[in-house]
Image (cartoon, rainbow, N blue to C red):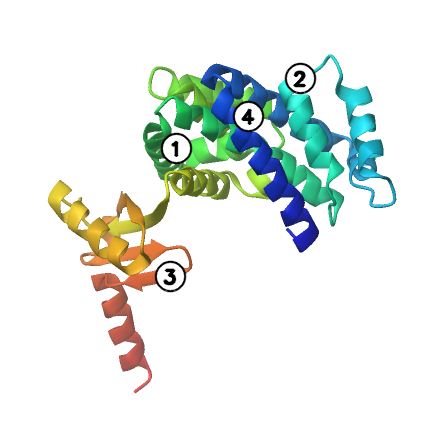
Amino acid sequence: MQAASRESYRAATERLAAYALRAEPSAVATTADDLLSVAGLLGRESRLRRALSDPARAGADRAGLLGDTLRGKVGADALDLLSGLVSGRWSASSELLDGTERLGVEALLASADAAGELGEVEDELFRFGQVVTGQPALAAALSDSAVPVQRRAVLARELLAGKATPTTVRLVEVALGGFGGRSLSGSLTRLVELTADRRDRQVAYVTVAAPLSDEDERRLGARLAAIYGREVSVKQTVDPSILGGVSVRVGSDLYDGTVLRRLNETRNALAKR
């Protein structure tokens, strides 16, 4: 987002935080669904999206247009949050769309936070991403943009039935729609990171040839926390093809100490002789 959009979104998150403090988690989850449904509407209706982000129109005028469009279709709390959102300045209509969708996700995370479920949601999203990545046919079925999101969501709900919180299931549905224009895999990764961030944690993606013990994982997390100055959620992937060692990615930082990397470096060095 550009500066004006970032400021408008920041103001909206402050209103959401104040609302989430006084509302029941179930009410916040309902508001989140309303916000996400409006994000879907804005994604489909480009003319409405442009009108609601038009800098030539006063903020109150844009909020009035939103109210006329949505009154009776979403709850009063969602309408209040959305009115504040569109009253701000947006650098592009696409950024208003992204901001609306992100606000819906943040509302879902706020409801899970209030219910004490954020840690579960983070782990469930990561595990679902691993399942999808490990099964190419499943990944293709869930990522097929020629199939409506609602139909793909039925498959996802069947896979997660009895295994995930309602918040996780809803976030997976968001990922199926391409959160922020990302792929399914990219959407799930971003949602894991947003969930961890709400817990004031950094995510470390760790690839190993064989599973780390709980103690080794704890020690690695502590070392990374000392480096990054905040708690770290270690997300472990087992890949025998790396042969040994460990690869760690934190944000844009990559620490690759795998045997496979060292073999490739040796092979490349020999090839240059």
Secondary structure beneath dot 1 equals helix
Q: Amino acid at mark 4?
A: Tyr
Spatial CA distance of label 3 from label 1 is 22 Å
Tag 2, which secondary structure? Answer: helix
Observer-nearest residue: 93 or 243?
93
Viewer can see residue 177: no
- Please, is residue 98 above or below residue 253 in the view? above
In this view, 39 is above or below 229: above
Q: Alpha-carbon distance for marks 2 and 1?
A: 30 Å
Q: Is residue 66 above or below residue 52?
A: above
Q: For the residue marked with disc 3, what is the amino acid?
A: Asp
**Residue for badge 3:** 253
Which one is closest to the eye, mark 3 or mark 4? 4
Q: Tell me the tag on residue 76.
A: 2
Q: Nearer the viewer, mark 1 or mark 4?
A: 4
Quarter of the picture containing the C terminus is: bottom left
Report, in whole angstroms, how far the alpha carbon at label 3 lies from the one at label 4.
36 Å
